[in-house]
Amino acid sequence: MPRSAKLFIATLLLTACLLPGTAAATSAPRSCHSADLHYPADLFAPNGPRIFGVFGLRIAHGPCTTAHHVAQDWMRRFETAFRAGRTIVPRSVDGFRFKTLPAHEAQEFRERGQMGTTTIWFDYRIPNG
């Protein structure tokens, strides 16, 4: 086998080995803007600190617009049930299947939603009154 053919095969194998590493690097979760999904501690003081709502919104294998829309719909469904006197955590929203993860803080729901290869994570903090 000529030297140039061996060099070509070696280069081809090296390139093939590097491709999966590159794909994995692009699939890392990215943070998304969620400030408009926060609400103040005292709803009657609109200028108060916005310490409740969706925080830490992240997505892997998808755009932030999808993460934002799904988190907003999840929040609406949770709040509708909560106002009706039920603490029901939505399990399915917009095609995403949600699982509640162990909380790190009081009054917090840590959620992970998956649909296909797309995964969304967020923390939802609720007031206690």
Image (cartoon, rainbow, N blue to C red):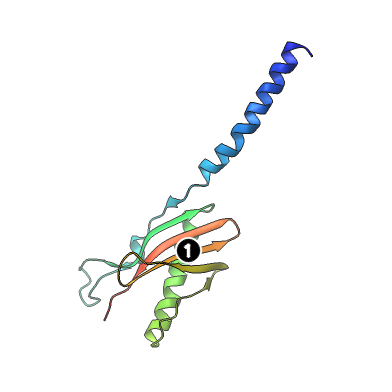
Q: Where is residue 90 drawn, in percent x and y?
A: 48, 75
Residue 95 appears in which quarter of the rendering? bottom right
- State left or right for residue 25 relative to residue 37: right
Circle 1: is it few (<14), some (14-19), or many (20+) Cα within 10 Å?
Answer: some
- State left or right for residue 115 relative to residue 129: right
Q: Where is residue 18 drawn, in percent x and y?
A: 59, 32
User: Which residue is label 1 attached to?
Assistant: 112
Q: Where is residue 84 drawn, in percent x and y?
A: 40, 87
- State left or right for residue 38 relative to residue 19: left
Front residue of 64 and 121: 121
- Under tag 1, what secondary structure? strand
Quadrant including the C terminus: bottom left
- State left or right for residue 123 relative to residue 29: left
Amino acid found under the numbered disc labelled 1: Arg
Residue 57 appears in which quarter of the rendering? bottom left
Q: Residue furthest front?
A: 102
Q: Residue furthest right?
A: 1
Front residue of 61 and 7: 7
Q: Where is residue 96 drawn, in percent x and y?
A: 55, 66
Q: Residue furthest bottom?
A: 85
Q: Residue at x 26, y 70 (%)?
A: 40
Q: Is residue 88 above or below residue 25?
A: below
In this figure, what is the number of numbered marks?
1
Q: Residue at x 48, y 66 (%)?
A: 70
Q: Is residue 4 above or below residue 31?
A: above
Q: Residue at x 43, y 83 (%)?
A: 81
Q: Is residue 56 above or below residue 19?
A: below
Q: Residue at x 47, y 63 (%)?
A: 112
Quadrant including the N terminus: top right
Residue 44 appears in which quarter of the rendering? bottom left
